[in-house]
Image: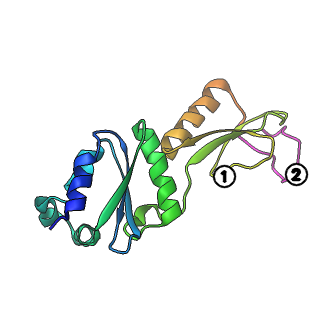
Amino acid sequence: MISTELRSKLRELPHQPGVYLMKDRLGSIIYVGKARDLKRRVSTYFMASQKVRANLKTRALIDSIHDFDFHVVRNEEESLLLEGKLIKDYRPRYNVAFRDDKRFLLVRIRLADPWPRFTTTRTKKDDGAKYYGPFPHSGALRETLDWLNKSFGLRSCRPLVPGETDYRHC
């Protein structure tokens, strides 16, 4: 049975993209999710028909939900980034897929190198390089960088020996 407070919160949900945080009876965040339409997505957790069709893990999640919060964002990309950040911050027990602490990829280029090249990294350092991103789809990013390297004849190798500055083998 859904409480009066939850019904009221469900009615107030906007038809906008965003991120929602499901909480247990102690107020702990147990799940973080994203939605194109917050009202439609969050409401599904409280429909009896959804619970019947759900797998055991999802049923356990649904049974544990006592409250929720939400954040409206401008678009789906923003919701994906915020969802990842919140999962890393709160480490909810029902978000097992995101708990590996992988960060989104960044593209790094050091313009001070004699022959600059694109590399990917998950962390930004204060090393004088330019960083672009984050990019949530690592496969698409790597394909794009491969295409750029081949199309424009960019350097894709690194020195053979760490600290070596001779790039003649490239």
Give me the residue at 42% from left, 36% from top.
Answer: 74
Q: Residue 140: where, in percent of width, then height?
A: 49, 39
Disc number for residue 159: none
Q: Which residue is mark 2?
A: 163
Real-space Cα distance between discs 1 and 2?
A: 21 Å
Q: Please tell me whether residue 67 is drawn above or below residue 126 in the rendered image.
A: below
Tell me which secondary structure the magenta stretch mostly adopts: loop
The type of colouring in the image is rainbow
Q: Nearer the viewer, residue 24 or 140?
A: 24
User: Which amino acid, by three-letter code, is at mark 1?
Assistant: Thr
Number of other residues with Cα within 10 Å of mark 2, as a class: few under 14, some 14 to 19, many 20 or more: few
Q: Nearer the viewer, residue 65 or 77?
A: 65
Q: Which residue is mark 1?
A: 123
Residue furthest top in the image: 152
Left or right, residue 22 beside residue 82: left
User: Which amino acid, by three-letter code, is at mark 2?
Assistant: Gly
Report how many numbered discs are placed on residues in the image: 2
Q: Residue 90: where, in percent of width, then height?
A: 49, 65
Give me the residue at 55% from left, 49% from top.
Answer: 104
Residue 80 visible here: yes
Number of other residues with Cα within 10 Å of mark 1, as a class: few under 14, some 14 to 19, many 20 or more: few
Question: Who comes first in sequence, dot 1 or dot 2?
Answer: 1
Give me the residue at 16% from left, 64% from top.
Answer: 51
Corner quadrant of residue 50? bottom left
Q: Quadrant of the N terminus?
A: bottom left
Residues in magenta?
Answer: 156-170
Q: Residue 126: where, in percent of width, then height?
A: 78, 47
Corner quadrant of residue 108? top right
Q: Nearer the viewer, residue 109 or 24?
A: 24
Left or right, residue 164 beside residue 148: right
Question: Which label sits in the foreground, 1 or 2?
Answer: 1
